[in-house]
Amino acid sequence: MSNIKKLIDLFYFDQDTNIPIINNYGVYRAGLTGEEVIIYLTVRAYQNNIKFNDKLMKKYYDIAGANTCAVVDSKVLHYRWDVQRFASQLFNGTATHFD
């Protein structure tokens, strides 16, 4: 439980939806690293009483498919808007509008 508390403490939360605000999170301004995406998804899964595991990650990747990304310092960064909308489809069934 203390590990998830540390992850939760990395975020601010929307007062209406209680969803982690992704815009203030991450090292790079251009987007999130793969590890940061996993942390975001872990927090979202915890909020929805879902165990984060490889099966859930595969579902996320199936939703995300191939997308554009940024590359900074030889690191692939996932755009925050994409991560948020794919996670919303995964956890809330919210359709993505661009795919």
Image (cartoon, helix red, strand yellow):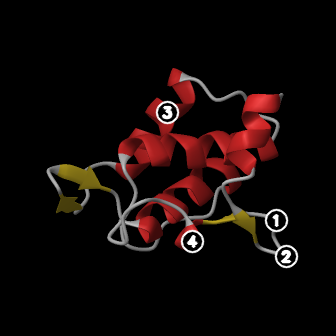
Image marks 2 and 3: residues in contact by CB distance under 8 Å: no
Q: Which corner quadrant of the image does residue 62 belong to?
A: top left
- Give amino acid for label 2: Gln
Image marks 3 and 1: residues in contact by CB distance under 8 Å: no
Q: Position of residue 82 (x, y in %)?
A: 42, 64
Mark 4 vs mark 2, CA separation in Å: 15 Å
Mark 3 vs mark 1, CA separation in Å: 22 Å
Mark 2 vs mark 1, CA separation in Å: 6 Å
Q: Relative to 83, is 16 on the left or the right? A: right
Q: Which residue is mark 4?
A: 24
* Earlier-in-chain disc, 4 versus 3: 4
Which of the two marks, 4 or 3, is nearer to us in this view? 4
* Earlier-in-chain disc, 4 versus 2: 2
Mark 2 vs mark 3, CA separation in Å: 27 Å
Q: Residue furthest left?
A: 74
- Give amino acid for label 4: Asn
Mark 4 vs mark 3, CA separation in Å: 23 Å
Image marks 1 and 4: residues in contact by CB distance under 8 Å: no
Image marks 2 and 1: residues in contact by CB distance under 8 Å: yes
Which of the two marks, 1 or 4, is nearer to us in this view? 4
* Element under disc 2: loop
- Give amino acid for label 1: Asn
Q: Which residue is mark 3?
A: 57
* Element under disc 1: loop
Q: Position of residue 3 (x, y in %)?
A: 73, 30
Q: Which corner quadrant of the image does residue 28 belong to?
A: bottom left
| Rendered image: mark on residue 15 | 2
- Give amino acid for label 3: Met
Q: Which residue is mark 1?
A: 18
Q: Residue at x 47, y 48 (%)?
A: 37
* Element under disc 4: helix
